[in-house]
Image (cartoon, rainbow, N blue to C red):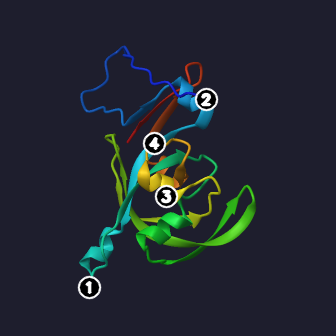
Amino acid sequence: MSHLHHFNFGININPPLQSSTAVGIQYTPAPLGQIGVNFLIEISTASAYLALPSPPERKTISVMAHLDTGASTTSIEHNIASHLGLFSIGRQRISTANGTSTVDSYPVDLAFLNSSLKGFQNFRVSSCQMAHFNLEDCLQNPNKPKNFGVLIGRDVMSRWHITWHGPTSTVFISD
């Protein structure tokens, strides 16, 4: 059985960072080597729908997300879209390791929990099927790193400064 270890450590940066600099998310070696960069986010019904005369109920779910440098767009597991009652705004063709397919697209609000990263409102995501994702498990305990239901694509990562220090397998993400 594999055990994840949490490390607490300080970093001495010379010269000191500017006062406006903020590290959004920081990861350390053990989890990165085993599962990559996974972190907790919140997905909600898009804010744009709240302005409708009869707005739908705003639903939210906390779920683990995985940085996927091979994905051009951010995708959510189709069971999450169904759970939130999201409204499809069209279909798009995506390419995956299993080939190409046409999937639904949805507007959502994304928030990056436990970090200073700025969220996105009315952000278009595609849907996908992730065989490993368990919605019921996520609803009971959203903090399980291997039960990720979102793939963060380059559409989001291109807005961030991401540093992966290979020798220590440490990642820093900031906007």
Q: Position of residue 160 (x, y in %)?
A: 44, 43
Kind of residue at badge 3: Glu
Visible in this render: residue 31?
yes
Q: Are marks 2 and 3 in contact (CB under 8 Å)?
A: no
18 on left or right of 75: left
For marks 2 and 3 on the same chain, the one whose residue lies earlier in the sequence: 2
Kind of residue at badge 2: Ser
Q: In 3D space, how far apart are the residues under numbered discs 2 and 3 (Cα atoms)?
A: 23 Å
Visible in this render: residue 74?
no
Q: What residue does disc 4 label? A: 39
For marks 4 and 2 on the same chain, the one whose residue lies earlier in the sequence: 2
Which residue is located at x 43 percent, y 56 percent?
139
Which residue is located at x 45 percent, y 68 percent?
83
Q: What residue does disc 1 label? A: 54
For marks 4 and 3 on the same chain, the one whose residue lies earlier in the sequence: 4
Q: Position of residue 100 (x, y in %)?
A: 72, 66
37 on left or right of 24: right
Dividing the picture into quadrants, the one containing residue 94 is: bottom right
Q: Nearer the viewer, mark 3 or mark 1?
A: 3
Q: What residue does disc 2 label? A: 2
The label shown at residue 137 is none
Q: Position of residue 95 (x, y in %)?
A: 69, 62
